[in-house]
Image: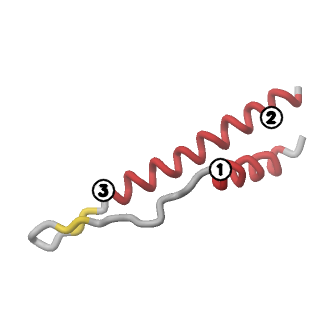
Amino acid sequence: MDFEALVKAKFDEAYHSSEHPKKFFLTENGRGVVDGGEMYNTLLTDVLNVVQKAIVGILKDSHHAH
């Protein structure tokens, strides 16, 4: 089994299986401090969803190969 190819295929599949945020919002307080917390949390959630889908797919496929 070509594990590298499987991992790449599953990550590509996971990435393309859902929509990703198109806009990120940065909030600024009255003192001009920009807070990227919302952007970070949105990005982190999106990345983790892709990783989780990919890992589940990899484990399923590698399990079937044995």
| Dot 3: element | helix
Query: Would residue 11 be found to the left or right of residue 63 on screen?
Result: left
Up-down: is 54 above or below 26? Answer: above
Which residue is at 88% across, 26% downward?
66
Which residue is at 66% across, 55% downward?
16
> Which tag is nearer the camera, tag 2 or tag 1?
1
Query: Would residue 28 be found to the left or right of residue 11 on screen?
Result: left
Which residue is at 53% across, 58% downward?
20
- Residue contact between numbered discs 1 and 3, judged by CB atoms under 8 Å: no
Which residue matches tag 1? 17
Which residue matches tag 3? 37
Residue 34, image x and y in percent?
23, 68
| Dot 1: element | loop
Q: Residues within 10 Å of mark 3 (few under 14, many from 20)?
A: few
Residue 8, image x and y in percent?
75, 52
Residue 29 quadrant? bottom left
Mark 2 and mark 3: span between their CA atoms?
A: 36 Å
| Display colour scheme | secondary structure
Q: Residues within 10 Å of mark 1 (few under 14, many from 20)?
A: few
How many numbered markers are drawn? 3
Residue 58, image x and y in percent?
74, 38
Which numbered disc covers residue 61?
2
Mark 2 and mark 1: span between their CA atoms?
A: 17 Å
